[in-house]
Amino acid sequence: MRLTGSDILVRTLIEQGCDTVFGYPGGQILHVYDSLYKYQDEIHHVLTAHEQGAAHAADGYARTTGRVGVVIATSGPGATNLVTGIATAHLDSIPMVAICGNVPTNQIGTDSFQEVDITGVTLPITKHNYFVGDVGELADVVREAFTLAQSGRPGPVLIDIPKDVQMAVGDYAPAAPVQPISPQPAKEVRIQEAAKIITSARRPYIYFGGGVVSAGAGEELLALAERIDAPLGCSMMGLSVLPTDHPRFLGMQGMHGHLASTKAMSGADLILALGVRFNDRATGNRAKFSHGADIIHIDVDGSELAKNIGVTCGLRGDLKETLRGLLDILPAARKPAWWEMIATYKEEENANQDTRPGMTPKNVLERLNAHLEADTPVATDVGQHQMWSAQYLNFKTPRRFVSSGGLGTMGFGMGAAMGAAFGTGKRSVLITGDGSFGMSLQELATAVTYQIPMVILIFNNGVLGMVRQWQTLFFEKHYSATVLGRKTDFVALAKAFGAWGEKVDCLEDLDGALSRAFDASGPYVLDCKIDADELVLPMLPPGGSMDDLIMKVEGKI
Amino acid sequence: MSKYTVAVLVRNQSGVLNRVTSLFRRRQFNISALTVSETESSELSRITVVFEGEEDYKQQLVNQLYKLPDVCSIKEFNSDNSISCELLLIKLVNDPDTRDEIRTASEAFGAVVVDYSKESIMLRLTDESHKIDDFINLMRDYTILEICRTGSVSLEKGGNTIRQMINF
Ligand SMILES: Cc1ncc(C[n+]2csc(CCOP(=O)(O)OP(=O)(O)O)c2C)c(N)n1
Ligand SMILES: [Mg+2]
């Protein structure tokens, strides 16, 4: 059938199973918005307050559903406002398709009004991008973009469509939703080799990350741990793959990881690294990281193997299938001596627990835990509050922790929590900081418009806490530009936007406030006052190794 | 630091060269020679890159190149497994005192005169890059007006081809 480019675009999105898009209109994308109007019964457009919020919303939608998140923006400033959102998705390997309008083909390259070379700008932060010069290619480009975004190691793909191509008429023949190209399992010989190393290990430790989430390999992961009797720890991106209270799970390791998890990793003689990339936040000093342990690294992206850390055995392949391959041949083992050591690590962790009363981050988050349903998605912003969330939140269902790991994007949370609510149809929770919330609070308008049920918990410490923590520890308390000293009244602000809000100054009031927030039909802001001097501990100093672990600072936990 | 020659077979589309070279830029590799040309198939182009760098960085770069959807196949070359050559055009001042020396050197290297005027001589030489280096060094004794070299191109010896490794 003959359709305009913009109709072809929207029909192809619908055909690919896309039910929700996030975006913001403008001159060079008007035709697409006209088609969205036409097909509004089949595809829901969510108008955000800022394109960055739309990009993060598409990202939060993708993280919680596993489906491709779609964001739409106009040319020029609309497109450049997507950049941080695309980079965030890129560094966390999140499937996303970003669609931008551009000036008509005959004006491309002339610096015409609102023209930006967005394919050039996003080249290093996308898996791939397209400039569509011919309406005849449009439908297939969209299909290829959906394929690429989801295949292998997922990631963002951008499609730039000049206005005349949106208007031009071309042929459209509906097609079936594309299937991601399934990567092969690792080579049989490699699996055998890995199995041999695993069998001879005495103290195996499984270290997993976001790759397990995208491969949906949680079950195989646990089966492997049971089979070889190993404890499990994860990078931040691996959180929520396993129930937090699983007896084998020691929690997140790394710079701010759980003591037992970090210690077990350094006490291990074999680290089985699954879908991780040994980010410096996770490894500390890379030279001292492996401490002579064998490392088996399995990843779908071959370029990750040996990129950051030398490995004994690298396996490139689909995680789920590769783990199944290992499970087929690995004999069951018991490691009682290793678990005795782990028990001592856990004791040490328990002895170092923060037991202070009052509005401490831990107490606040433990109260919050009691209000979370098994499948409530929780998004965070970036800073101390993010690390406390990673340390203390309880998860029961995969894909429920939504946080910017690789890029560490402040301002990510609002958009992501909205996208998570749309994706899952559940009330979402945002844990944010006063600094981060300041970067994205305009999205309260969106949350109110769409009456998104959202609990927004602000850890209000009056400071850019995480940066200030570094100044406390490494810059002689020179608090340069980290003390906010703002007069913002977040409750009044929430109300001004048409949302609810209340201040929580002491722990006794928190439960009641949380109950009200979780009962609300729309966004509800909880402004929780905490001490500016709270620290995230333990802390592995940058470039440090286990020996440099900071456990306590001047009576602060 | 070592010198590497890598051929990258890519989809023949606009912007592909940019995608490939941008990976080199990101890793701070300085490209010493680069050629791009069409191939036996109009859908594919071949990019040959000569660059210096550390071995593990080079390996990482090749791994990253493989991830580009436009990259069909990659081949690394060394002098044992391949034939490489490069084309040089060099223009010198035509001075009666040095004319004969230049001619003798050209004959020894197999360079041919492709343009001749009262003021200048232009020579053409096709050979391996290091031979071309040698020839240019020799010519520095005279007055060089202009040099243009294409950068090295390489093909594997024997019946194997880069297309046999295509992993679409
Ligand atoms: C966009 C952006 N700018 C700057 C930073 C650097 N940064 C990391 S954490 C942080 C402080 C965050 O403050 P807040 O949101 O109040 O969280 P807190 O650490 O106080 O919990 C800053 C400035 C960043 N991660 N992202
Ligand atoms: Mg703060």
Image (cartoon, coloured by chain):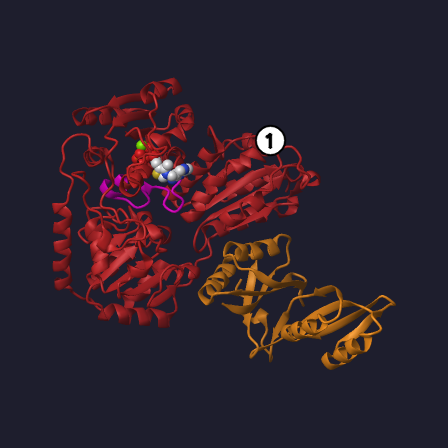
Chain colours: A red, B orange
User: Where residue B54 sits in the image (x, y, percent)?
Assistant: 47, 65
Q: Quadrant of the N terminus of chain A?
A: top right
| Residue A88, quarter of the rendered image | top left
Going by the picture, which residue comes out furthest to the right? B118
Quarter containing ligand 1? top left
Q: Quadrant of the C terminus of chain A?
A: top left
Front residue of B49 and B44: B49
Q: Is residue A314 left or right of residue A225?
A: right
Q: Is residue A239 left or right of residue B33?
A: left
Name the residue carrying label 1.
A30
Q: Is residue A443 left or right of residue A224?
A: right
Part of the protein shown in magenta: A388-409
User: Where residue A58 sits in the image (x, y, percent)?
Assistant: 44, 39
The residue that appears at 83% across and 70% down in the rendered structure is B95
Say whether residue B84 is magenta: no
User: Where residue A548 sits in the image (x, y, percent)?
Assistant: 23, 52
What secondary structure do most residues of the magenta stretch adopt?
loop
| Residue A356, quarter of the rendered image | top left
